[in-house]
Amino acid sequence: MNEKEEMKAYLVKELALMLIENNKDISIEEALTTIFNSETYEKLMSDATKLYYQSPGYVFSFLNNELKTGKMA
């Protein structure tokens, strides 16, 4: 695994933990499914956006907004 892939994996893990922290009723599987099916995840995996260079909190703000509004930004 190269450095970019490690950064992406780290962010996915942190996003899942943040989702669980904000909603104690969801499982890790549900959190990961939510992330993997999001537009935020698509942008996170894209080398063009370089979103994986950002902090977990910053990326979570996009995910949280997407979950609330149906739109990433």
Image: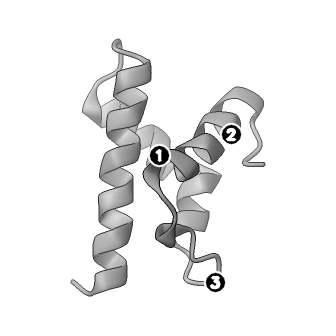
Spatial CA distance of label 1 from label 3 is 19 Å
Amino acid on which the number 3 mark rests in the picture: Ala
The residue carrying pointer 2 sits among few (fewer than 14), some (14 to 19) or many (20 or more) residues within 10 Å by Cα, namely some
Spatial CA distance of label 2 from label 1 is 10 Å
Spatial CA distance of label 2 from label 3 is 20 Å
Relative height, residue 53 to residue 34 (above, below)? below
Q: Earlier in the sequence, mark 2 or mark 3?
A: 3
User: How many marks on residues?
Assistant: 3
Q: Position of residue 20 (x, y in %)?
A: 35, 26
Q: Which residue is mark 1?
A: 35
Q: Which residue is mark 3?
A: 48
Question: Which residue is depicted at the point 31% across and 64% down?
Answer: 9
Q: Position of residue 41 (x, y in %)?
A: 53, 57
Residue that extends furthest to the left in the rendered view of this protein: 1
Query: Label for residue 66?
Result: 2
User: Is residue 70 rendered to the left or right of residue 22?
Assistant: right
Query: Label for residue 11?
Result: none
Amino acid on which the number 2 mark rests in the picture: Glu
Question: Which residue is depicted at the point 57% across and 77% down?
Answer: 50
Question: Which residue is depicted at the point 44% across and 21% down?
Answer: 22
Q: Earlier in the sequence, mark 1 or mark 3?
A: 1
Q: Are marks 2 and 3 in contact (CB under 8 Å)?
A: no
Q: Position of residue 34 (x, y in %)?
A: 47, 39
